[in-house]
Amino acid sequence: MPSSNNARPYLQCDVFADRPGAGNPLAVVLDSEGLSDEDMQAIARWTRLPETTFVLPPVDADSSYRIRMFSPRREVPFAGHPSVGTAHAVLQAGLATPVDGVLVQDGIAGKLPLRVRGEGDSRTIAVRVPRARVQEVASADDPRLQAALAGLPLGQLPPALMDGGRRWWLAEMESEAALRAASPDWSAISQLAEATGSMGLFVYARSDDPVYYYAVRAFVGAPAQFEDAASGAANATLAAWLAERDALPDPGGFYRISQGREVGFDAIIELQVDEAGDVWSGGRVCSIVEGVLRWR
């Protein structure tokens, strides 16, 4: 039912986090009926968060709810942290109930299941992401990559361009210490992103930490230049690449990653490659701000 007096239920949460301030922030407008595309874009620009999502009623019995996702610049067909965070918000608001532990999100990327496990603060939510594809496998001396990879000690797997709705260049580094100490060349990464129609450079390294198996960093080169605090979709492309190379760290296809420490966050994302080869990306979510949004 549409909200009255322009007061729409509103939530801000931290995704892939077990405590406030550790994960990737998200705004969720829980009743978006009557908002135009222009309204949604304006609200997303106003929140200044990586993404803002808008929840709408389902149009058929196969869906739990519909979703629109906007960055401050444009509508986004799919992203991992907005999917997981919106499912958390919908559950908290009582707008949908999992069936056999699964919610179904209906959006531009189609109908995607979200697996819900546990309750309360220990609850985890994972979305089955659209299948990522290997676009090409390159070498470190590829002219397009040389400048962006300069000074980065690389690991064993070759660089690869993956497409999971958004395209990322993936590059393994030789150690977690080297990855965390890396200083990105933003000009080179921006040129790489623009030349190859990609988001930029996603680097990863194995870890001996007891909680996570990989540490990762995501350097977005275009249209802006920034390091992503936690990206479920980008990490899902890594999981697909590791599966392609038979390099998953666990026979069951499950592992955790650490992301965001270098930019003041501390996200943990859980990845699972199932028997069908589908990738699930998820983790925990913390609610931070609850209230109403008034937007005429």
Image (spheres, rainbow, N blue to C red):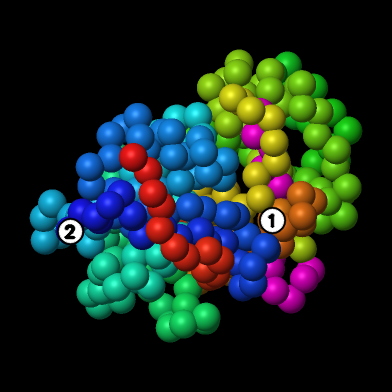
Element carrying mark 2:
loop
Element carrying mark 1:
strand
Q: Nearer the viewer, residue 144 or 119?
A: 119
Q: Nearer the viewer, residue 45 or 78?
A: 45
Q: Nearer the viewer, residue 36 or 73?
A: 36
- Residue at 50% x, 29% y is 73
Image coordinates for residue 138, horizontal then vertical, percent: 64, 28
Image coordinates for residue 219, horizontal then vertical, percent: 69, 37
Picture disc at residue 1: 2
Residues packed near mark 1 inside 10 Å, few (<14), some (14 to 19) or many (20 plus):
many
- Residue that carries the numbered disc 1 in the rendered image: 259
Q: Amino acid at mark 1?
A: Gln
Image coordinates for residue 159, horizontal then vertical, percent: 67, 35
- Residue at 34% x, 70% y is 93
**If the image is split into quadrants, where does the N terminus sit?**
bottom left
| Residue 213, magenta (yes or no) | yes
| Residue 155, magenta (yes or no) | no
Q: Which range of residues does the magenta coloring cover?
A: 208-221
Q: Nearer the viewer, residue 120 or 205?
A: 120
Q: Amino acid at mark 2?
A: Met
